[in-house]
Amino acid sequence: MNYHLYFHNDFDGVASGAVMLDFLKSRGNDIISFTPINYSPTLKKNWANFKFREPFIIIDFLYHPKASWWFDHHPTSFARKVWREKFKGDKNHVFDLIKKSACDLMAGHLKKEFNYKPPKFIAGLIKWATIIDSASYKSAKEAIESRQPAIKLALALDPINFKARAMAKYFEAIIKSLACEPIAKTVQIPIVKKEIRRIEKKNKEAEQVFGKISVLTDKVVFIDGTKTGAQLSNFFGYYFYPEIDYAATLEFYGKYYHLIVGKNPWKKIPARVHIGEMLNKYGGGGHRTVGGVERKTKSEILKIAEEVIEYLNKSR
C-alpha cells in the first residue's frame, strides 16, 4: 500500500519519516507524498476537519482517528478530549510520553511488533533524533557550534523563503536521503547545504548584536530574533546567559511569529512548569521542558511572551 506522510517539520519529524519510509519499503509499500506540518494559531481548532490525502500516516504530531499509522510522544497530542478518552493503542497507533523522541519510539515499536531491522546508518539517525529532540547536548556551545552533520541539518529544517509546494519537495528530498544514506550525505544536498550556510551566516550576525536583541528579567531571557532577520538557535539564550533558568525566543517565518520557550537543559533545577501544557492554553504545545506557540501579529505574540515570562519568573 502507498501512503501520504504528514510529519512535524523538525529533526525528529524528518528522522521519523525516514525510518517509516525504510520500514515500508522493506515490506513492499511506499510513501507517495510528504507534507511537513507545524502548529499554527487555528490548527488544533480545525484539526478534526483537516483535509488529508488518504490513506495517511502522522508522525510526531497531533493524533487524528483516521490515520492509518500514528506515533507521537507529546503530552498535547490530542486536539479533542474525547479522542484522548477513546484512544487505544495498537500495532499501528502508539502514544508514549516516556520516550524522548518519536523516532526512537517508532523504531523500537516496529522492531518489537514487525521485526524491523534498520541499517546501521538509520540506527545513528535514531540516536541523533533523541539527542536533538530532548536537547541532550553536552553544552549550549555544542548545540550552536558543533560540526556534527545532524546538528547542522537540524538548523536547516525551517527554510523561511520556501512556498508550500517547494517546502514539501525540500523535506521530501531530505527524508528520502536519510532513508538510504548517512546524515553526512544528506547535508551535502545542494539546496540543504545552501540553507545551512545561510542560517550559519545569520546566526553569526545575530551573535554580534545579541545584547541589543535580548532582555534579561530575573531568570528568563527574551530574545527578539525579528530584529535580526535571522533564524536563531533556540540555545542562544543559554550560550550567552548560562545562569538563566528559561529562554524565550521570538522569530518570524512562514507568515507567523513563532515563540519558542525552553528550560535550561544544563542547569539542574526542578521542572516546576510544564511548558508544553502552559503553551497549550494559547493554542501551542510541546514537552515538559520546551514548547512553542504562533500568532499572525507581533503584538499578539508579544503579549503571550510577556505573560509567559511573568509566569515563569513567579513559578520557578
Image: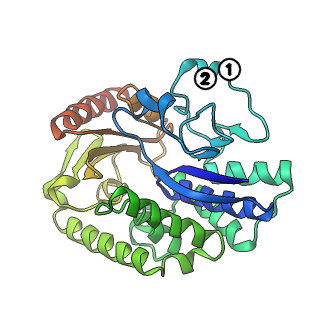
Q: Quadrant of residue 131?
A: bottom right
Q: Separation of disc 1 and disc 2 at Cα?
A: 5 Å
Which one is nearer the viewer's eye here, 281 or 34?
Answer: 34
> Are there few (<14), some (14-19), or many (20+) residues within 10 Å of tag 2?
some
In this picture, residue 160 sits left or right of residue 5: left
Residue 276, above or below 176: above
For mark 1, give the secondary structure.
helix
What's the amino acid at mark 2? Answer: Trp
Amino acid type, label 1 = Lys
Assign a secondary structure to mark 2.
helix
Q: Which mark is residue 83?
A: 2
Q: Are marks 1 and 2 in contact (CB under 8 Å)?
A: yes
Spot occupied by residue 86 in the image (x, y as percentages of width and height): 68, 20
Q: Nearer the viewer, residue 17 or 252?
A: 17
Q: Residue 88 in the image: x percent, y percent?
A: 73, 27
Q: Quadrant of residue 205?
A: bottom left
Q: Residue at x 71, y 66 (%)?
A: 123
Res 143 seen here: no
Position of residue 254 relative to residue 155, above or below, is above
Residue at horizontal 74 percent and vertical 32 percent from the top: 89
The answer to whether residue 93 of the structure is visible from this angle is yes
The spot of residue 26 in percent (x, y) is 79, 64
Mark drawn on residue 86:
1
Q: Is residue 243 left or right of residue 230?
A: right
The label number, if any, that marks residue 165 in the structure image: none
The C terminus is located in which quarter?
top left
Color encoding of the figure: rainbow
Q: Badge 1: few (under 14), some or many (20 or more) residues near its Cα, within 10 Å?
A: few
